[in-house]
């Protein structure tokens, strides 16, 4: 895993041409990352070059050029995949478009960074994986919470045995982005446009972190619910966080707002997972708790710069302690020196994009790549089967596919 210690020679570096498809929240956030990489990472192996950006909304295309410094923009995303100066395509469009863009990018020999969950359905993710395998390109999936310095520290504590044998795991992602019934019917709420609901959008992050921290999940049983069944139809081009008005025409929500699941890891660890976009209260609780025979730890995105740690002991002062983020943890010092001077959400994306750029420049596979996305959708597919069967389902690899 590359590290940046702000030391090292200034070299002439290769240029890596970046093309972005979908210039909404994530397209803009990753583009900001690429602009910041030269200022943050002295040991970068390449210079990112913002070549071309595609969006169906003209104002966003204009902003990409005038404010973000893309050389050009295009209405048709195919122009990004085919552009001769693009080395890596960043896919930040609605989920259902991902697999078409990934396949075209791979066919053109481009490396691909695709936002999670890669495909809107397990089958689409498997297609994307197969396209990248056939083309031999480097892939990345946007599981950005892996890059939080304190999440990495948590992984080291677990691996190093500080918690003893791990027995239990709780993963959850509660976001309030869908809690307002007047929140518009964006692509996220439609199976046709977004694929599955929170099981793709939010649970993917929770399961990926669980895989990284504890290992593969073997069995799962779960339930789902759609708690807000109708939403106002948005104006074309309105962001997915837009708000309609009472009395606006509405359409049905066709995927799930909530999932809850029990799971067992291959090593026997017992787990619970929950994800919701409509609960009122938790604003962005992407969180996990890990319990072992000698200790426990907890992390929550709402307190990104804090890790809660319990190490079993006999003394009267034994109890959970709070470790603040600081420059003694990987990458934190690239953003801010000292301890308890916090970093933020987009800083995780900058680390993620730096590592992807590094992998492309070195010609090495990035982690997490599409293989990690495939590992998640194997769990998702078992969960979806359990919705139908009402029973425990084994996690089986989503055919490392001969789908074409
Ligand atoms: N990793 C994370 O933390 C995180 C957070 C949010 C979203 N995401 C993922 O990022 C992706 C995008 O989500 P978002 O929140 O940025 O959505 P968004 O709706 O803000 O942005 C999507 C953009 O794609 C554009 N678009 C739609 N159709 C297009 C087409 N045919 N060609 C080109 N552009 C098109 C839209 O106009 C919009 O600007 C999704 O896959 C989502 O799951 C990841």
Image (spheres, rainbow, N blue to C red):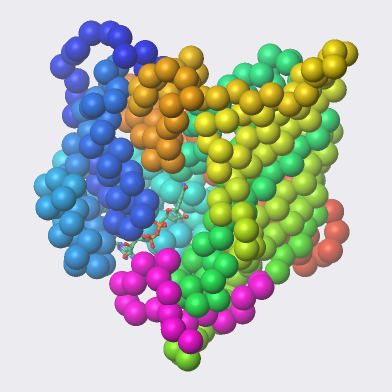
Q: Quadrant of ligand 1?
A: bottom left
237 drawn magenta: yes
Point out the residue furthest to the right here.
314
Residue 330 vs residue 291: left or right? left
**Which of the pair 31/95 is nearer the observer?**
31
Residue 51 % position (x, y): 17, 44
Residue 226 vs residue 78: left or right? right
Residue 27 % position (x, y): 32, 51
Q: Is residue 352 visible?
A: no
> Based on the displayed image, in which of its 4 quarters is residue 223 positioned?
bottom right
**Which of the pair 74/273 is nearer the observer?**
273
252 drawn magenta: no
Secondary structure mainly formed by the magenta segment:
loop
Q: Is residue 389 above or below residue 221?
A: below
* Magenta span of residues: 226-246
Residue at the image point whose x is 35% and y is 29% from the top: 354
Residue at the image point whose x is 62% and y is 58% from the top: 281
Residue 119 % position (x, y): 50, 55
Q: Is residue 317 visible?
A: yes
> Based on the displayed image, in which of its 4 quarters is residue 210 positioned?
top right
Residue at the image point whose x is 72% and y is 49% from the top: 273
Residue 226 vs residue 340: left or right? right
């Amino acid at each position: 895993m590359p590290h940046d210690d702000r030391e090292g020679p200034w070299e002439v570096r290769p240029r890596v041409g970046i093309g972005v498809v979908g210039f909404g929240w994530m397209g803009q956030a990753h583009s900001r990352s690429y602009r910041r990489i030269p200022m943050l990472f002295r040991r970068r192996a390449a210079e990112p070059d913002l070549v071309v950006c595609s969006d169906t909304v003209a104002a966003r295309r204009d902003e990409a050029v005038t404010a973000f410094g893309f050389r050009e923009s295009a209405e048709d995303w195919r122009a990004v995949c085919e552009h001769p100066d693009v080395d890596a395509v960043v896919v930040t469009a609605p989920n259902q478009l991902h697999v078409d863009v990934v396949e075209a990018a791979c066919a053109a020999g481009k490396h691909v960074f695709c936002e999670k969950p890669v495909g809107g359905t397990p089958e689409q993710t498997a297609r994307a994986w197969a396209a990248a395998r056939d083309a031999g390109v480097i892939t990345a999936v946007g599981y950005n919470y892996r890059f939080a310095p304190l999440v990495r520290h948590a992984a080291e504590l677990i691996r190093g045995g500080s918690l003893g044998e791990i027995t239990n795991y709780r993963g959850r992602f509660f976001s309030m982005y869908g809690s307002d019934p007047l929140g518009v019917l964006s692509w996220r709420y439609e199976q046709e446009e977004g694929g599955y609901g929170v099981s793709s959008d939010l649970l993917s992050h929770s399961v990926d972190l669980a895989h990284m921290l504890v290992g593969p999940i073997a069995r799962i049983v779960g339930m789902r619910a759609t708690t807000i069944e109708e939403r106002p139809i948005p104006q074309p081009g309105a962001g997915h966080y837009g708000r309609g008005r009472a009395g606006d025409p509405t359409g049905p929500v066709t995927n799930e707002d909530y999932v809850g699941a029990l799971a067992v890891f291959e090593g026997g660890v017992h787990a619970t997972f929950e994800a919701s976009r409509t609960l009122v209260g938790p604003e962005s609780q992407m969180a996990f708790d890990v319990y072992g025979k000698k200790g426990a730890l907890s992390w929550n995105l709402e307190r990104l710069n804090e890790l809660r740690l319990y190490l079993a002991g006999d003394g009267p002062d034994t109890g959970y302690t709070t470790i603040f983020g600081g420059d003694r943890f990987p990458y934190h010092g690239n953003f801010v020196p000292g301890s308890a001077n916090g970093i933020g959400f987009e800083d995780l994306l900058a680390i993620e994009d730096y590592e992807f750029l590094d992998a492309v420049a070195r010609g090495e596979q990035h982690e997490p790549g599409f293989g990690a996305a495939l590992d998640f959708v194997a769990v998702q597919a078992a969960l979806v089967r359990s919705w139908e069967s009402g029973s425990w389902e084994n996690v089986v690899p989503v055919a490392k596919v001969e789908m074409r």
